[in-house]
Amino acid sequence: MRIKVANQARCIGCFSCMMACARTYYKTVSLKNSAIDIQTSGGIESAYVAVVCHACIEPPCARVCPTDALIKRKGGGVVFHEDLCTGCEQCIDACLVGAIHMDVDRKAIVCKHCGICISFCPHDVLEMRKIDGMDDVNAKISCDEVK
């Protein structure tokens, strides 16, 4: 399963998805500790953009991790081993969609694709997509196609 931004135009920048992620995994109300990021270019007339891990089939973040803190997950995306993370930030540079950042302890914040953000989004911006394997049309999305 992976999270997909299905209805971007519905996002009003309420940050409910970010708050749910931060509170669930970091037990904090800081939006900096969310694996999903809602961005805008500023101003009331600007559109909001939800930035979330695309669950790459061949994740570049895992390829560059020198300590194997990020391991390729079957079906796309990565599994993060916080105890192995040294805070080198190579994964941030490698992520083509900008979905990885560091917490205050210099550990990577990476989406687990748990779906908690979807549960708290009041406007159906996000959805969970099932990925059965490489034969699934959605599973063929590659991070190289994103930018």
Image (spheres, helix red, strand yellow):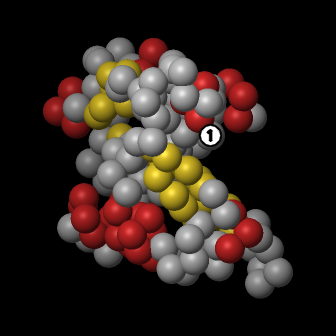
Nearest to the observer: residue 138 or residue 14: 138
Nearest to the observer: residue 144 or residue 128: 128
40 w.r.t. 111: above or below:
below
Examine the image and state in which quarter residue 20 appears. Answer: bottom left
The image shows residue 40 at horizontal and vertical percentages of 70, 67
Query: Label 1 belongs to which residue?
Result: 97
95 w.r.t. 25: above or below:
above
Local secondary structure at mark 1: loop
| Residue 85 seen from this side | no
Residue that extends furthest to the left in the rendered view of this protein: 83
Query: Going 77% across and 84% down the picture, which residue do you hit?
Result: 44
Q: In which quarter of the image is the C terminus?
A: top right
Amino acid at pointer 1: Val
Q: How many marks?
A: 1
Query: Going 60% across and 55% down the picture, which residue do you hit?
Result: 5
Residue that extends furthest to the right in the rendered view of this protein: 45
The image shows residue 53 at horizontal and vertical percentages of 51, 43
Q: Quadrant of the N terminus?
A: top left
The image shows residue 22 at horizontal and vertical percentages of 33, 65
The image shows residue 38 at horizontal and vertical percentages of 58, 64
Query: Going 30% across and 41% down the picture, which residue do you hit?
Result: 107
Examine the image and state in which quarter residue 63 appears. Answer: top left
| Residue 28 seen from this side | yes
* Relative side of 69 to 144, left or right: left
* Relative side of 28 to 8, left or right: left
70 w.r.t. 27: above or below:
above
Nearest to the observer: residue 139 or residue 147: 139
80 w.r.t. 17: above or below:
above
Nearest to the observer: residue 102 or residue 18: 18
Examine the image and state in which quarter residue 67 appears. Answer: top left
Q: How crowded is mark 1: few (under 14 residues within 10 Å), some or many (20 or more)?
A: some
